[in-house]
Structure formats: C-alpha cells, structure tokens
Image: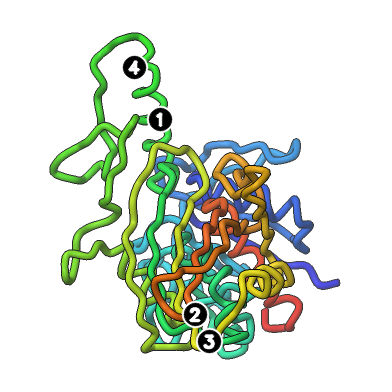
Amino acid sequence: MRKYSVAILGATGAVGQELIGILRERKFPLKSLKLLASARSAGRVIEVNGEKLVIEEATPESFADIDLAFFSAGGSISEAFVDAAREQGTVVIDNTSAFRLDPNVPLVVPEVNGDDLTWHKGLIANPNCSTTIGVMALAPLHAQVGIKRVVVSTYQAVSGIGAAAIDDLHNQVEQYIKGEPITARTFPSASAAKQYQMLFNLIPHIDAFDEGDYTKEEWKMVRETRKILHDDNMPITCTTVRVPVFRSHSESINVELHKDLSVDEARQILAKAPGIKVYDNPKEQEYPMPLLTTNGDLVWVGRIRRDYSVPRGLNLWVVGDQIRKGAALNSVQIAEELVERELL
C-alpha cells in the first residue's frame, strides 16, 4: 500500500492534537508526519504514542513533498497558505470556514456526500462541526423521503470556542466552590464587547451577529446543510446556544418530510445509516447525552417522535463529539476516502 507524507497546520490546537491521535488510531498510511504552527510554537516537542515530534514554523516552503495537509489554524491562516500548498501538489483538507461555501470546493461529510470528492481541485472543505453532526441525521431521511423544512436548535459545548474556554469554565467552577466572585473572559467569545458567566447559564450567541440578526454560526448551518444535501432551496432555520458542557454538541432537530414516515420506520432508516447510533428508549431513560458521546466517533440519535403540529413532522435529538466527528475525525475520514477512491 502506498504511504503518504502528511502535514498538520495548526498542530498545537485542540483539533490539531486530535488529528494526530486519530491518524495513529485509525492506522492511516503515513510515510511521514510534519507538524506546523506559528513561530512562537516552533521547537515545541509533542509526544505521540512514545514518538517525539517537533513543531515547525509554517512557511510556504513547508509543503514541499507533502501529499496531504490538514489545515486547522483559522481561516486567515488557511487563506495565506492554501495556494502555496496546492501549487506544490499538496491536497488540502481545510477545517475552517474560509472555503466552505466556495462553489468550486467540495464540502464533504463522507457518509453523506463522499461522491463530491471526485471533483476536488486540491482543496476540500470540512464543514462546521454542528453542521456535520446535524446532516448525519438529516441525510438518511432526506434520501429516503425528502425533507420539506428543518428547524434546529443547538446546545454547543464550550470546547467549540477552544482551550481557553475550557479553562474559563473550569475556573468558574472553582470560583463557585470557593465562594469567590465568578469572572468571565471567554463567553460568548474573548473578543466580544461583553463577557458573561457560563456556569449555570446559557448564551444564545455563537459567532458574530449577521444578516437578519442571525449569528454567523446559524447561517453556517443553514447554508452548509443545503450545500452538502445538494438542495439550495431547502427551508432551514436555526438557533445556536452555548451551554456549560465541556465537550459534545447536542441538537434538537425538527423536520417536516415530503412523505410520511412512522417513528419506527425513521428509527430503522437511521439505525442502518453509517456513523449513526440510535439510542432511543425513553421508558428506560435511554437517550443521547454529551457524556455518552464524548471521545466517541458516532453521532447518536434519540427522542425520535412525531411532531403532531404539522403533517409528516418528526422530532430528533442528536448528539456528537464536535472535536472528533465534527472536525478531526471527519477530516481523516475524508483523507481515507481520497485514498480509497485513488483521488490523492
């Protein structure tokens, strides 16, 4: 089997660290692994499965002789390096929002639209983590009977912001236990004009406010879902909420279908779909929760029930680890699909 020279741009971040582990865990055919980050991280040593890897400063020349690069260092960094990488023959899987809606760049969840990889031109976009988790549940139903309308509310873990947000919530817990005043530095974001306590709170504000007073995160889910499902006119509305959970995003999804499905039929369709675990037994208090999905690869679906307010309506509760399936794992699965299809 051919082996590949791989680089990770943004190797010191949460997704970059997860990528390193998943590539090893899934035995991706690595010839070499180059870890790239900013100049301030250059020289830092990371140990993976007993092997010591040194972080290098990312430069345009870093991609010489690299077959595949995972970009996970922010949109502006991706934009700065993508041309240099592609010009040197590197295929880039980008985990930022920089290219997701570019019509010339496939936006891929392999279980849903892996065929879109066939028209890549050296750049593939990884969707927003909440989009990925949501479309995993939507796609099997859409393929079977068609979806008329979608209403989504998300309950997103603080790790979606980054390591600083995890530390911030940890500090708030410790401050509460000690009876100290609770400080906030990261919520809704470090750059926001106001900061709010996350502990014992919910914040309906993820990313900046945009058109129609929807946030960019909400518009990402709407537009990316349409692109992945190849339905530019699908009516979708979304509200995204930050919750005091460390890891794994949850989503309440309401769908109105074009054709009727019973609850049992919906369960059967979802249970057969790759990457999905149906966990739905309310009588035994069995339903997806962040604690069950953390560090896991599957998207869990439960609370499947009829919506009696509309014809052909269903409610779903969908939970997945947004760092793994929502980001790093999906990126590696894209790479595996490229290898399988001989597109790399």
User: Which of these two is toward me, 322 or 145?
Assistant: 145
Within 10 angstroms of label 1, few (less than 14), some, or many (20 or more) residues? some
Q: CA distance from mark 1 to mark 4?
A: 14 Å
Q: Earlier in the sequence, mark 3 or mark 1?
A: 3
| Viewer-nearest of discs 3 and 1 | 3
Query: For numbered disc 4, what is the local secondary structure?
Result: helix
Query: For numbered disc 1, what is the local secondary structure?
Result: helix
Q: Earlier in the sequence, mark 3 or mark 4?
A: 3
Residue picked out by circle 4: 176
Above/below status of 48 relative to 281:
above
Q: CA distance from mark 3 to mark 4?
A: 48 Å
Q: Earlier in the sequence, mark 3 or mark 2?
A: 3
Name which quarter of the figure residue 187 lies in. top left
Would you say 73 lies left or right of 187 here? right
| Viewer-nearest of discs 1 and 4 | 4
User: Which of these two is toward me, 149 or 94?
Assistant: 149
Q: Residue at x 57, y 65 (%)?
A: 69
Residue 312's tag is: 2
Task: Identify which amino acid the numbered label 1 is placed on.
Answer: Asp
Residue picked out by circle 3: 146
Q: Residue at x 40, y 76 (%)?
A: 310
Would you say 175 lies left or right of 227 here? left
* Whole-percent x, y for residue 180 in the image: 27, 12
| Viewer-nearest of discs 3 and 4 | 3
Q: Earlier in the sequence, mark 1 or mark 2?
A: 1
Residue 167's tag is: 1
Q: CA distance from mark 1 to mark 2?
A: 44 Å
Query: For numbered disc 2, what is the local secondary structure?
Result: loop
Above/below status of 299 relative to 167:
below
Within 10 angstroms of label 2, few (less than 14), some, or many (20 or more) residues? some
Within 10 angstroms of label 4, few (less than 14), some, or many (20 or more) residues? few
